[in-house]
Amino acid sequence: MTNIGTLFAFVVSAIGVLVLRYTKPEVPRPFRCPAVGLVTPLAVISCGYLMYSLPYDTWVRFVIWTAIGFAVYFVYGHRNSVLGKYGDQLPKE
């Protein structure tokens, strides 16, 4: 279970790095990745392959726990959203 969660996080991170490199090239980056156009797709492919090779019951648990996590996240966010409470008129800091 830990393996699939960690691999999924690596896949999401690698995709995020690649997307941000092309959509926001002006953002300062204190950490540089050499050959980002090669490293990130290889990371996605290798982690994706490792995820694919995990047993079916691991995938079922992953999907169930992810759904529970999303439900908790969105219920909490809906109840505690500052934007939901104040709308367009957010309090001044």
Image (cartoon, rainbow, N blue to C red):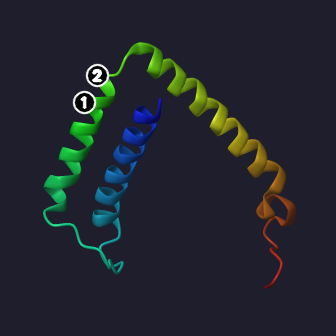
Question: As drawn, is 10 to the left or to the right of 78?
Answer: left
> Please, what is the three-letter code of the amino acid marked with disc 1?
Tyr
In this view, 35 is above or below 49: below
Residue 75 position by quadrant: top right
The crowding category of the residue bearing disc 2, from other C-alpha atoms within 10 Å (few below 14, some 14 to 19, many at least 20), is few
Q: CA distance from mark 2 to mark 1?
A: 6 Å
Give the x, y percent position of residue 48: 29, 34
Answer with the quarter of the image where residue 50 lies.
top left
Q: Residue, x 51% and y 27% (percent of image)?
A: 62
- Front residue (pair 47, 83): 47
Quadrant location of the C terminus in the rendered image:
bottom right
User: In the rendered image, which residue does mark 2 sit on?
Assistant: 53
Marks 2 & 1, CB-CB < 8 Å contact: yes
Farthest residue toward the top? 56
User: Which of the 4 image quarters holds residue 11?
Assistant: top left
**Disc 1: CA contacts within 10 A as few (<14), some (14-19) or many (>=20):** few
Residue marked by disc 1:
49
